[in-house]
């Protein structure tokens, strides 16, 4: 739009100069489990625990933790701060039913995935497969799952090594005689994770659970950290020992915050780039896109999600013809000494 300011003096405002990054979701939880009632393989955005019970029925008996897993996981999610939950009732408790449910959730906007009542032995490979598949379609997310078994030896048996997977231990204690496996601890941890910003560490954060089935001494706590297990310990209530993924020691994505911050940056870049779809792919428009991305990343620095970043936006002649733009970010997440290089091809 061209506007005359004074005779002979005009300003030309291009629409690209007014584009800013849209809102980026950070705490939406997708949970798959079994229930007494409700539609199967159909995602439902819940409005609260009452809505969940009305739809899916009451939870299973405490002495039958593998029965009707969905409601108890949902209540643990809400009790620990989750506010946006997409629930799906699986057709059964077997792997194929959970795979079908996760496939249904693949294109939903979800940041954290929980498999209600399931552990690394029964569903670990299913969860990893889902996370790998959704990363390929630009739907990055983190999975939280319980460690298999009930003893230290079992908790320390490393079955997964993936920077998108969090494995939790121990199980939960209800009253004197009832316990639930670590799979339900995973739901509580996911609820806490969903309630904080990507740059907020959940290390030493309190967890709202009734009790712990196993207590760990200091030596055992160190072993669990080395094994990539996110342990919950008794400390002024119940708290997260250290917010870690199952990534190998030394991997920058061992810290949950690093994984979440990088995913947030990628989602933000896509959100900022969407309004440019259909516009000219020339130097002027790419400069406007870079300015939009600079504004988004600068806000991440101001919000203390990043300590520093570098950004380049470019396109070869072939990319211009194909309508593609290359975005290269080198970012340093808070709490990390590593610079993470992210290359994205926007189409």
Image: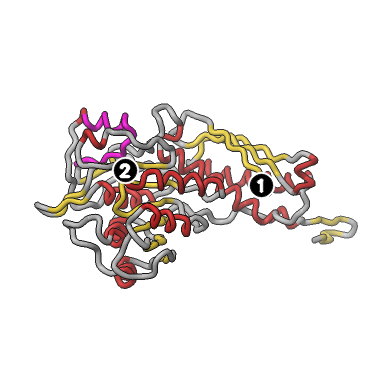
Q: Nearer the viewer, residue 10 or 138?
A: 138
Specify the quadrant that holds the N terminus: bottom right
Q: Residue furthest bottom?
A: 54
Q: Position of residue 299 (x, y in %)?
A: 55, 46
Q: Residue at x 22, y 46 (%)?
A: 171
As drawn, the label of residue 28 is none
Labelled pair 1, 2 in contact (Cβ < 8 Å): no
Q: Nearer the viewer, residue 290 or 73?
A: 73
Q: Residue furthest right?
A: 8
- Region rendered in magenta: 220-234
Q: Position of residue 345 (x, y in %)?
A: 66, 43
Q: Earlier in the sequence, mark 1 or mark 2?
A: 2
Name the image quarter holding residue 258.
top left
Q: Does 318 sit left or right of 7 as displayed?
A: left
Q: Residue at x 27, y 48 (%)?
A: 185
Q: Residue furthest left?
A: 176
Residue 224 magenta-highlighted: yes
Q: Position of residue 280 (x, y in %)?
A: 78, 52
Q: Does 301 sit left or right of 63 as displayed?
A: right
Q: Marks 1 and 2, Cα distance to the nearest angstrom?
A: 37 Å
Q: Nearer the viewer, residue 155 or 19?
A: 155
Name the image quarter holding residue 342.
top right
Task: Note whether 63 is above or below 168 in the view shown.
Answer: below
Q: Find disc 2 in the rendering and name its residue.
A: 121
Q: Does 270 sit left or right of 190 as displayed?
A: right
Residue 82 magenta-highlighted: no
Q: Find disc 1 in the rendering and name its residue.
A: 346
């Amino acid at each position: 739009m061209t506007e005359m300011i004074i005779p002979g003096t005009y300003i030309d405002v291009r629409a690209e100069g007014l584009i800013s990054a849209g809102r980026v979701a950070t705490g939406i939880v997708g949970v798959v489990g079994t229930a007494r009632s409700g539609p199967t393989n159909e995602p439902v955005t819940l409005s609260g625990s009452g809505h969940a019970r009305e739809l899916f029925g009451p939870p299973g008996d405490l002495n039958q933790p593998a029965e009707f897993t969905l409601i108890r996981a949902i209540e643990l999610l809400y009790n620990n701060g989750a506010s946006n939950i997409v629930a799906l009732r699986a057709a059964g408790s077997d792997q194929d039913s959970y795979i079908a449910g996760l496939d249904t959730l693949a294109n939903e906007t979800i940041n954290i995935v929980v498999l209600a009542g399931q552990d690394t032995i029964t569903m670990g490979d299913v969860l990893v497969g889902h996370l790998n598949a959704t990363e390929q379609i630009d739907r990055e997310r983190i999975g939280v799952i319980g460690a298999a078994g009930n003893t230290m030896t079992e908790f320390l048996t490393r079955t997964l090594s993936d920077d998108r997977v969090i494995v939790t231990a121990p199980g939960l204690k209800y009253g004197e005689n009832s316990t639930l496996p670590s799979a339900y601890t995973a739901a509580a941890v996911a609820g806490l994770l969903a309630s904080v910003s990507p740059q907020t560490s959940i290390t030493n954060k309190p967890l709202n659970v009734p009790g712990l089935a196993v207590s760990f001494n200091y030596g055992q706590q160190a072993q669990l950290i080395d094994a990539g297990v996110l342990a919950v310990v008794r400390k002024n209530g119940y708290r997260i020992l250290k917010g870690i993924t199952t990534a190998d020691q030394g991997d920058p994505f061992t810290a949950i915050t690093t994984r979440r911050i990088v995913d947030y940056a990628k989602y933000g870049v896509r959100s900022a780039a969407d309004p440019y779809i259909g516009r000219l792919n020339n130097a002027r428009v790419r400069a406007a896109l870079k300015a939009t991305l600079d504004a988004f990343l600068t806000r991440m620095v101001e919000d203390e999600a990043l300590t520093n970043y570098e950004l380049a936006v470019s396109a070869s002649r072939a990319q211009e013809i194909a309508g593609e733009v290359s975005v290269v970010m080198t970012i340093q997440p808070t709490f990390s000494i590593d610079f993470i290089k992210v290359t994205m091809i926007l189409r």
